[in-house]
Every structure is written in structure tokens, then in C-alpha cells.
Image (spheres, coloured by chain):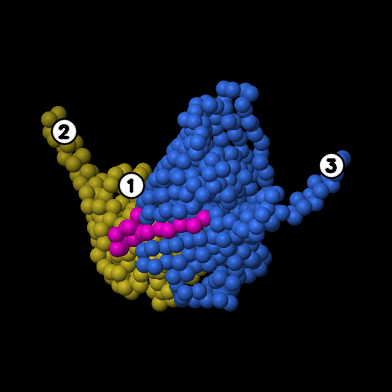
Chain colours: A yellow, B blue
Amino acid sequence: MKKQNVFLVALAALCASAANAASLDVSLPKGSAELSFDAVGKPSALRIRGTTSAVEGGLTGASGKLTGKFSADLATLDTGLRMRNEHMTKKYLETERFPRSELVILGIKKLPAGPIAAGDYDFEGELSLHGVKKPVRGLVHVTRATASEALFEASFEVSLVDYGIATPSFAGITVANQVTINVKGKTALKTL
Amino acid sequence: MMLAFFAAFIFSPLPQAHAFVEMVRHGYFNCIACHASPTGGGLLTTYGRALSKEALSHGTFFFEKKAPAPVAAEETSKEEDFLHGAAPLPGWLLLGGDVRLLQAYSDTRSATDVRAILMQLDLEGRAEYKRLSMLATAGRQEPPANQRAITDSLISRRHWLSAKLGADSEPDVVQVRAGRFFPAYGLNIPEHNIVTRRGLGFEQGEETYNAEAAYLGEGFNVYATAIFGRPDAASLKSRRGAAVQVARAVGTMGRVGLNGYTGVGAGDSEKARRNLVGANAAIAFTPKHYALLEVDGDHSVASAWGGAEYFKIAWELDQGLHLFVDQEHQRRAFQAPDQVFESARVRHGGLDRFSLLSLGS
């Protein structure tokens, strides 16, 4: 009887270990998330928000150690005003030369070894924007997670100067250098 | 009931939910991006003219294709410039003007009346030197019946001096000004004849001499105003007092504000002192759907508490073409039936069309 108990405990530990070692595939198909940026124009504290749903990418790896990349089509960013869109894409982001921005995720801290759970997680990565690659740090907030999907919101800040983007200015209104990037969406989860 | 409705409206979840306060739907929380005046209204800045063409005026119909926007910041089509670019202005000078005409027609059993009324004809200019600005309007007003001189028809509704006191990086954040203008109170919208403007003493022509200090921050604004009435026209018995307005941004497409005002007419007793407290909101549900709301309590010892409320909800069908319904309600005194003035109705519904023609003025 005692031997049987020891065997069951060992089997359970083995199963748990196997589950921990399982790979996870996190995919973000195009259209399943919205990327937005929040910028402030001065004077007047004009609030500029640009959005696009042309975001895609994914993460893979052993659960707890996910890496991967996401990219966005910058030419599709919409701030609600045609002239502002034209200025943003053509003059400042120069999307004809640099049509996409890519975020490579190098690591997500404190991610549980088992299934993804709701919570806040810091991430580190590299952002390619306007032809410049720079390290970034941000926060991803998983609002709800099941075995097959997770709802999340991620945010990080970028400095326009760091990416060689000219300070946007028009008729006396100048956009502040710090811009907040937000991504909100639903990922598909698959245990491999 | 109204306060409950207001509270529900403000505090219910919004999808991130002056002058044209409704421009908050494009992220314009403060007025100074587009207007020379810190409280909005009147003369447009260069940016305001460009934005008017881009986001407000009905320059083309929905079925017409617009020309691509110029990419270089310095480039403009000249359409939005003063006199459509025919007379380029130096950077320190802004000029503009307002002309409003009303064609009235009434046909009753006793008489038919057709009248053209020139409601407003004003020129407005602002000169700026470093951190100092000077603005003045000059125009025509309806002459009194016993007109003696041509000057009786002339009026300067607004004239003031202002100084920017903010840090070098953001000088506009703190401003002081003195002169004749409306104190900051409530929604400063163009419909001057609604109960929250005319009914509370902020009708066109009722501008007073004031001294104002303003903080125009990223998330909130504060205006404090000392009101000196009309020392140049004592017979008007304009009220003297003070006003304060605090406004806070809500998401990227909304703002809510609280107001206080106290004033008593020159020579009037303290019983006639009028005290106002109010709340207002400009909320956009989407960049094309928005609502404006103002609720005010109106108190004096003589008439006790009364109130005024204005609500507008609108849908921008096409750029510059807004389908809207608005409603207003005012009671000068809730508890004195013999002193009640009441108006409760759907004020009107219709279309607002913001014409590009106005841009040349």
C-alpha cells in the first residue's frame, strides 16, 4: 500500500513536470488586436490618438519563457483627421520607407510555468521603428485567460527622438516627445 | 431628477468618452489650440483656421473627392488663410471677423412681417509680442432709438491684454488677462440665446470688465475671474463679483466641468446677489457622435433657488453637417410660482452646416 502511494506521488510529479515543460503557442492573428498611440500636442494639451488593427504576431516557447515578435502596418494608423494622418505617415513616420514597426519580445518576467493566468507581467524587447532598433520595456496586463485564449492590454513608452523621428509640429502646435503605445486584444493559445 | 440624470450620464461607463466645445471629439480639450482667447470663441489661430477647414467646415460634399492634404507643415492651400491668402499676415498678427444675418418672416392674421436683421458685424484682431497679447473687436450694434451720433452704433464687445506666465517650455499653461470679455462659466457655445447663456446673464453684449488667471494643464483647466461689471456704462447695472471654472479631461474625447459664480449689480442690494453653481460635460461617443450638457443652480435671496439646463445630442452626418436635437429648461425660482419663468421644450432639431465661406474673414 505504501509502495503504491509512493508510485502515485512520483507519477503525479512526472505529469506536472511534463506539463511545465510543454511548449505554448500564443498567436495574434491580424485584426484580433488594436494598436493605438497617445500623444499630446502643446500648447493646449491636444490629445492625439491614432489607431490601427493591422497588428499581428505571436509568441512561442516553453511556458514561462515565451519569446516572439509582433508587427504593425504603420500606414494604416488613423488619428481621425485626414491632414494629420497625411502628415504623420508621410512626413514623420515616413511609411513609404519604413512601412512596418516590429516589436521583438525577448522575455516576459514572472510568467507562470503552467497555463497563462490573469495578472500583470513586465516584458522586455526590442522595438524597430523608423529604421531604428531600440530596447523597450513595458507592461502586459492579462485580464482573462482560458486554456484557448487570453485577453490582454499591453503598453510601453517611446521617445520620438530616440527613433530619429522629427518632432511633429503644425501651425504652432508641437507634439510632445514621449508617446505611449497601447495594444489591446485577444490571443489564441495552444499547448504544443 | 436632473442631477441624477447628470450624475448617471457623467459616471456611467463611456467608450472613452467651447467655441465649439464639441471639438473635444477630436481631442481638443483646451480652447487655445484654435482660439486666441483662453476661454475659446471668436478669433481663430492659424492652427484653428487649418483645423476648421480640415475637421469642421463643410468644404466638399460627401460624394466629392478631396484633394490630398499638403504634407509639408508650411504648405497650406491658402483656402483657410485670412482673405483666402490674398493678404498674407505677419506671424504676430491675427485678423478675422464675424458676420451674422437673420432673415425673419412672420405671417399672422393681423400682419405679415419680413425683416432682415444684422445681428453681428465685428472685426477682430490680435497682436502678440513675446509673451504679451492684445486683442480687440470693433463692430456694429443695433443703434438706440434716440441715436445721437454714429458712434452709438459702434461697439467693442471684447478687448483685453494677456500675459503668458508658464515655464519657458510651456508658457501657455499659466495665463493672466484683463479687459472686457465673458468670465469663464459653463459651456461657451455659439448659441447665445439658450437658457444657460442668455438666461444666466451671458448673452451676447453682456461681456464685462474682468481680471482672469488661468491654468491650462494637460488633464485639467482652472479659471478664476474677478468681475468688475461695466464701469463705463453704469446705467446697465452690470454685476460685479467673481467666477471660477474647473474642467477635467475624460479619456481622449471628453471633458467635464464645474462652475461657480457670484455677482451683484452696481447699486443693487445684497438680496439681489445672484449665485450660480453648475456642472457641464462635452462627451463624444465616437468622433461623429457627441453630446453637450449643462446644469446650473441659480440662487438669490430675492427669488431663492432656480435652475437652468441645456442638452444637445448630435451626429456628424458628413464633415460640417451635423444632425442634432437640443433641449433647454429654466425656472428662475422653484418655490415661488408667481416668479417662475419656465421653458421646457425640445428647442429645435436640425442641421448645423459649418461653411468654408467663413474662413476667409
Q: Position of residue A80 (x, y in %)?
A: 50, 60
Q: At 58% from the left edge and 56% from the top edge, which residue is drawn?
A: B155
Residue bearing mark 1: A142
Helix, strand or loop status at disc 3? loop
Residue B270 pos. (x, y %): 47, 30
Element type at mark 2 = helix
User: Which region is colored magenta?
Assistant: B158-174
Give the residue number, with chain letter if any, for mark 2.
Answer: A4
Q: Is residue B343 magenta?
A: no
- Chain bearing tag 3 is B
Q: Which tag is nearer the camera, tag 3 or tag 1?
A: 3
Front-most of residues A48 and A173: A173
Disc 3 vs disc 2: which is toward the camera?
3
Q: For the view shown, which residue lies furthest in the front direction? A: B148
- Residue type, label 3: Thr
Q: Chain of mark 2?
A: A
Residue A23: image quadrant is: bottom left
Q: In 3D space, how far apart are the residues under numbered discs 3 and 1 (Cα atoms)? A: 69 Å
Tell me how far mark 3 sits from mark 2, CA to CA. 104 Å
User: Residue A170's spot in the image, x, y percent?
Assistant: 44, 69
For the C terminus of chain B, the quadrant is bottom right
- 2 or 1: mark nearer the eye: 1
Mark 2 is on which residue type? Gln
Is A55 left, or right, of B94 in this rendering? Answer: left
